[in-house]
Amino acid sequence: MNMTLATGIPQSRNRSLAPLPGDLAIWFFIFAELLVFGALFVAYAYARRSHVELFNAEQGLLDRRLGLFNTLLLISSSFTAAQSVLCAKADRMRQCSQWLHLTLMLGGGFLLLKMLEFQRDAALGISLSRNLFDMFYLCLTGFHFLHVFMGTLILSAVAFKAGRGAYSSKNLTGIETGVSYWHMVDMVWIVLFALVYVIH
């Protein structure tokens, strides 16, 4: 007899939820980081509401093309990071390592492009003490920059270990932990880009 008909409860509800990928500790860390970024985003939105003209004028100084290109880099890097996990699950560790190195190249591209953007901003006179928008812009993007840098360090260690055969389909925790953190960094940037570069 069909389980749904017998109990009135779909079978999917009876199944236990799949465990979170990676180490549980990284999820506490990710949750804490999302809370911090969330608080900063709320503060930014509140400040913008009180200084609409200033924020609109200052946003016009930002290079949206650079921001968009960096967004595409991080979205692409999330795809390559996900591919590394799929390869690891299939015990294709060489391909896993290759996908991880491609992720690092994309992440490195983001960091390089963001540094060039910071140089451009400085040449335009954008600084922490210039006005309220500049303070939020530099704090948000600078804080995120540090997270991307930390993510590249984590994935570098994971890629190195993957290349040395430290992982397998039965030992994915390290890979999933690093990739989960990287997805968080990507997701935060998408919100940041929309909030700071796009929304007027």
Image: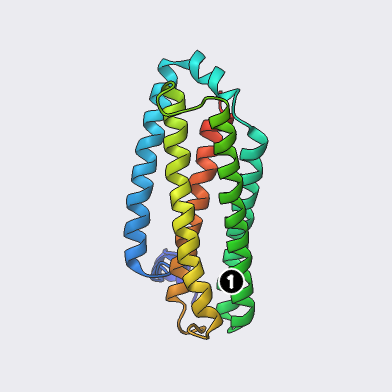
Q: Is residue 65 left or right of residue 187?
A: right
Q: Nearer the viewer, residue 59 or 18?
A: 59
Identify the residue position indicated by label 1 in the image.
84
Q: Nearer the viewer, residue 138 or 74?
A: 138
Q: Is residue 189 left or right of residue 116?
A: left
Q: Inspect the image, locate mark 1, and give the three-letter code of the amino acid beneath it.
A: Ser
Residue 120: x %, y % from top left: 60, 33
Residue at 56% across, 81% down:
163
Residue 95 sits above or below residue 178 on the image:
below
Residue 31: x %, y % from top left: 35, 53
Q: Nearer the viewer, residue 15 or 169?
A: 169
Picture colour scheme: rainbow
Q: How many marks?
A: 1
Residue at 57% across, 65% down:
81
Q: Residues within 10 Å of mark 1 (few under 14, many from 20)?
A: many
Residue 173: x %, y % from top left: 42, 75
Res 124 quadrant in image: top right
